[in-house]
Image (tube, grey):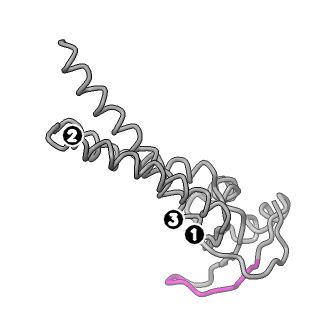
Amino acid sequence: MNPEAILLLRSAALIFGMRVVDVSLATVRTLMVMRGRKLPAWVLGFFQALVFVVVIQAILSDISNWLNVVGYAAGFASGNVVGMLIEGRLAIGYTHLTIVSSRQGPAILDGLRQKGFGVTEIPARGRDGMVTMLSCSVLRRHGKQVHSLVQQVDPEAFITAEEMRLLQHGFWGG
């Protein structure tokens, strides 16, 4: 490879990397905004805008280099995924789980309470008769633990999860 080709590839790789950072920050920032986390959203927004300006300057300085354009587009696509992975690892916020079991509701309820989770039991009627519906709001980082416990007790339980924004604290175990 000649030195000019190496410089073109290096420029495209740098744009790709900076765009991954930019979009990852944007993804996590958006999720912070949705969760009402003002300071982290502000800090992430500041650095996202800073990186974005640098990336735009770099791509516009040599728009005829199609590798820069490909690096920009690939960085955008990759940044979305990286941002989602980062946010998933952070697991900031709360989730509301609804668990429906036709046979093992009381056992699931006991297991969750033994682990310190707050659970509300709601008798309900399903297609084939009475079922137990359990309502459990937990920190997102505990969602997998609750899911695992439910699956151990009743692999046929129906579970849904909804993102939630806390308005007032009550009992939060786990």
Residue displayed at 82% across by 69% down = 172
Dominant secondary structure of the residues highlighted in magenta in the image: strand
| The disc label shown at residue 62, or none | 2
Inspect the image, locate mark 3, and give the three-letter code of the amino acid beneath it: Thr
The Cα atoms of the two marked residues, 3 and 1, are separated by 5 Å
Q: Does the residue at mark 2 contact the one at mark 1 (Cβ under 8 Å)? A: no
**Residue 123, placed above or below residue 84:** below
**Magenta run includes residue 156:** no
Residue placed under numbered mark 3 in the picture? 30
Magenta stretch bounds: 120-128
Contact (Cβ within 8 Å) of mark 3 with mark 1: yes
Task: Give the image quarter of residue 29.
Answer: bottom right
x%, y% of residue 52? 41, 52
Q: The disc labelled 2 sits on which kind of residue?
A: Asp
Q: Which mark is residue 33?
A: 1
Q: Which residue occupies the foreground of this view, 40 or 108?
A: 40
